[in-house]
Image (cartoon, rainbow, N blue to C red):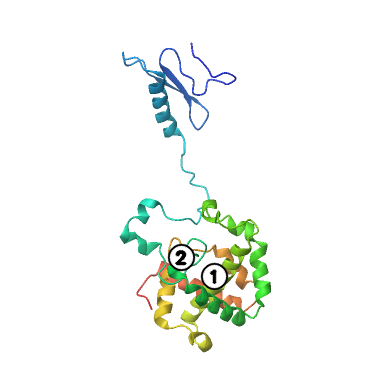
Amino acid sequence: MSSTEEGGGAVGAVSTDQTIIDNNTNNDYVRIDMRFTDVPLSDDEVANLRSLYKAFYAGQPNFTAKPLIRKVPSALRRNEDFKKYFMPKVISIGPLHHDDLTLIESKELKLKLAAHFVKKVGVDGESLYSNIKKEMDGLRNCYDPQELENYSDDNKELAWMFFVDGCAILQAVYMRYDDDDDDGKLFIKNDLLRFVYSDLFLLENQLPFRVLELLTSSSKNGEKFMDSIKRFIDDTVINPGEDR
């Protein structure tokens, strides 16, 4: 006879004949027969064995879930050779390295890039910022919630970050391909731009692509900025070559 928890069913119950009954992910009962041994097991030992089988059925990966922007696992963070894939050298993009003191100078650089973008795209900054603010709930959901615990629910700080960082990305990439932006090139050296470009595809240095769409959708001028982004992705990811 099987003993069951008071007020419950047979889930996780332990039988008097040393049989463990447990559930799998499909709510079908799995009977684990312990009678193959002549050594009696204590309740603690049976509980340990039950946890083993629960671990097998629990936590199956959800391959249909939307991937979230998050920090890399700690095991990879400890690998010095792997840091080049997630640690920015010059410019922080998004919240994961926003407060990194080694990148504090990038805040002024991003603000200058953003100012040039707003001038070039031909839409006032307030309207562009409002486009971001309206979709903050969806943009916030692109990140692992744990990474945004330090940002309040009113989204003011996060929205401004997305606005400035998004504008900066669009302007920097536009400068890579455009020849008529002499004013923009006056304040940033080519060697610094090279490091900026290498920082844009790092695992922990990401913005939702939707941010770029929101910043370029209000003006026909926005098309040329998005064309530069697509070209940059083609050159860097699809057809990678030497840095230019």
View extreme (front): residue: 101
Determine which residue is flagged by label 2: 100
Q: Position of residue 93 (x, y in %)?
A: 50, 67
- Give the mark, 2 or 1, whose residue is nearer the N terminus: 2
Helix, strand or loop status at disc 2: loop
Label 2 or label 1, whichever lies nearer to me, is 2
Q: Is residue 108 above or below residue 83?
A: below
Q: How many residues crowd mark 1 within 10 Å: few (<14), some (14–19), many (20+)?
A: many
Residue in view at x 47 percent, y 71 percent: 104
Q: In the image, 116: left or right of 82?
A: right
Q: Is residue 134 above or below residue 242?
A: above
Quadrant assignment for the C terminus: bottom left
Q: Which mark is residue 31?
A: none
Q: How many numbered marks are there?
A: 2
Residue in view at x 31 percent, y 15 percent: 39
Alpha-carbon span between mark 2 and mark 1 = 15 Å
View extreme (top): residue: 1
| Residue 218 seen by the camera | no
Q: Position of residue 27 (x, y in %)?
A: 53, 28
Q: Is residue 56 above or below residue 112?
A: above
State the residue in front, 136 or 231. Answer: 136
Residue flagged by tag 1: what amino acid is it? Asp
Determine which residue is flagged by label 1: 165
Q: Quadrant of residue 214?
A: bottom right
Q: How many residues crowd mark 2 within 10 Å: few (<14), some (14–19), many (20+)?
A: few
Q: In the image, 207: left or right of 127?
A: left
Q: Position of residue 139 (x, y in %)?
A: 59, 59
State the residue in front, 51 or 108. Answer: 108
Residue in view at x 49 percent, y 23 percent: 12
